[in-house]
Image (cartoon, helix red, strand yellow):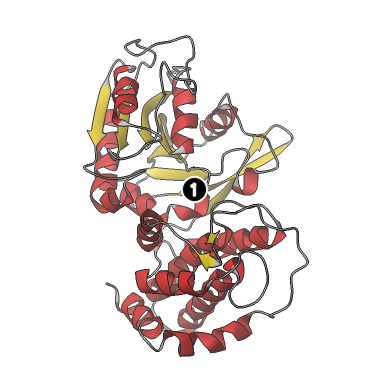
Amino acid sequence: MPRIRKTLAQGLCGSAAICLAVPLFSLLAASVSSAQPSTNTTNIKDGHGVLEERRVRAYKEMGGDENVIRQTVARITKQDGDAPGCWVYEWRVLGEYYENLGDAILKTGPRRAAQDAYIASIAYYALGWFPRVTNAEEAKDYDQQLRVYQKAGKLMDVPLEVVKIPFRDGFITTYLHKPLGVEKPPLVLYAGGVDQYKANHYRPVQDFLAKGLAVATFDLPGFGESRQWERDTKSDAHFAMLESYLKRTDLDTKHISLFGQSYGAGATLRAALRNDPRITAIVAFCGAMHLGGKNSLAPESKPGDKLINGPLLVANGTRDPGSPVEDLISTYQAAKTGDLWLLGLGEHCAVEYYPIVMPQVARWLVEQNKKK
């Protein structure tokens, strides 16, 4: 563990955590919120905060501290409000604490330590709006997460670029990450799920960068900064981005691939069904086509039909009821070429496998680029 992350973890863990956290509450005014009530009803059960174990693992992987996450959930008693015990408030206190710590370190300390503090801040702000932005307080928390991600982006080996993509009556904001020392890197368009927006993917993006890939993360229509639009059932957003990024001269536009996670995997598979030859490869991570079912992405087709020219990589845990193994297999078989990776006893998205599987996903994409 990097020294700064170990120090931060020690500072907020153990029996002293509550005492240390009390002064942090001064970061926010404890006023009664008159905002529109949240529709995020799954965070509270019988007057107690709730966070699934797989979510604890996910936000630890994102940069949070497991003990801090568990202690914070235990303090929460209701969703709405701007006071101790309220969901958004508790996570925002942590987000602002680590953001301020990053600001302080940046003035006199090492760049990497400041970045680590910002990444921790991003994870806690993300928990504040989890599982989606439904009111003004959660929107404020999401805006704060984006601001801190852009702060961290200035410290990346190649500074983050915010790229606006024309779409319908506005713009989709993408975060373009580029690898160090690669003159014209291949590009991956990276779509998350309904509760994982574009600033939530720092860790896997680093694995892609390490393999020489550029990555543009974005929010699908209906979510995050793209929530002004209805959900995009035709994957038009993917092709708006494709058309825009194809005009870049600093990227290898002959090798543009798509990565989708969860709901984003479904959107990516819809894009794949168009079989656009400008797309090099497709990754459907913890998503499936559900061929032959009521939620099929290709209602007129059946398992065994070859629908995608490929190459297509399908990956997920084997204990995901939303995308069971049989759906993963039929999705893999719907491509003329590709691979299927079943990740042990992992649940939806199998985040515990990320440190191993994401570098291998990046390597798989590099292999597909070499073949084209």
Nearer-the-camera pick, 270 or 41: 41
Nearer-the-camera pick, 202 or 131: 131
Q: Residue furthest front?
A: 46
Above or below, comparing residue 46 to residue 100 in the picture = above
Residue plotted at (67% across, 56% down): 38
Quarter-of-image position of residue 1: bottom left
Above or below, comparing residue 364 to residue 103 in the picture = above
Find numbered disc 1 in the image and state the secondary structure of the residue it sits on: strand
Instruction: Residue 85 in the image: state x and y as whole percent.
Output: 58, 74
- Determine whether, in the image, residue 39 is placed left or right of residue 291: right
Quarter-of-image position of residue 59: bottom left
Q: Is residue 180 visible?
A: no
Instruction: Residue 151 in the image: state x and y as whole percent.
Output: 53, 66
Task: Name the residue tied to disc 1.
Answer: 176
Residue plotted at (67% across, 41% down): 171
* Mark 1 residue type: Leu
Nearer-the-camera pick, 201 or 172: 201
- Please rate how many residues cluster around mark 1, counting C-alpha atoms within 10 Å: few if below 14, some from 14 to 19, many from 20: many
Q: Is residue 45 visible?
A: yes
Instruction: Residue 139 in the image: state x and y as whole percent.
Output: 66, 57
Instruction: Residue 26 in the image: state x and y as whole percent.
Output: 62, 86
Image quarter of the C terminus:
top left
Above or below, comparing residue 232 to residue 212 in the picture = above
- Determine whether, in the image, residue 122 is placed left or right of residue 233: left
Q: Residue furthest right?
A: 34
Residue plotted at (60% across, 54% down): 40
**How many badges with numbers are in the image?**
1
